[in-house]
Image: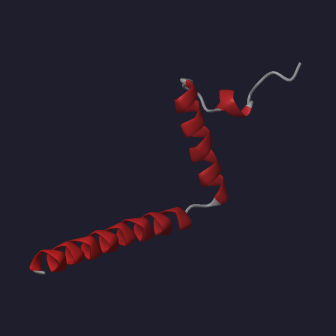
Amino acid sequence: MKLWKVLGLAGLAGVTATGVVIARDARARGQLSPDEVRERLHQRLAEADGRDDPAEVTGAGADPS
């Protein structure tokens, strides 16, 4: 019976730690402006595509002709 108690407490500690990490991440994301979020997403997409310049992904700075 003691083993189940230890396993239960370990599981509870794991769930608590996961909740703390998620809350911290959500708080950090909540402090970003929409423009900063958009910029980060474009940057991540450019990195995933292997491009150096995020403007290549968005089309910003591209010649319209």
Q: Position of residue 29 (x, y in %)?
A: 52, 62
Q: Nearer the viewer, residue 49 or 6?
A: 6
Q: Is residue 13 left or right of residue 24?
A: left
Q: Position of residue 24 (x, y in %)?
A: 41, 68
Identify which residue, 32 or 9, lies in the foreground: 9
Residue beneath the point at 43% across and 66% down: 22
Count of numbered circles in the view? 0
- Image quadrant in which you'd find residue 9: bottom left
- Furthest residue in direction front, as rendered: 1
Q: Residue at x 61, y 32 (%)?
A: 54
User: As drawn, which residue projects farthest toward the right?
Assistant: 65
Instruction: Answer with left or right where residue 58 lies relative to residue 15.
Output: right
Q: Quadrant of the C terminus?
A: top right
Name the spot of residue 39 as percent of width and height, x first: 61, 45
Q: Do we see residue 31 in this rendering?
A: no
- Tell me which residue sits at (66%, 53%) in the image: 35
Q: Quadrant of the N terminus?
A: bottom left
Residue 31 versus residue 54 in the image, above or below: below
- In the shown orientation, is residue 9 left or right of residue 58? left
Q: Is residue 59 above or below residue 63?
A: below
Is residue 65 or residue 8 the one in the foreground? 8
Instruction: Give the color scheme: rainbow, by chain, secondary structure or one colour.
Output: secondary structure
| Position of residue 32 measured from the top left corner of the image (x, y, whole percent) | 56, 61
Q: In which quadrant of the rendered view does residue 7 lie?
A: bottom left
Residue at 64% of width from left, 49% of height from top?
38
Above or below residue 36? Residue 31 is below
Residue positioned most to the left: 2
Foreground residue among 18 and 21: 18
Query: In this orientation, does residue 54 appear?
Result: yes
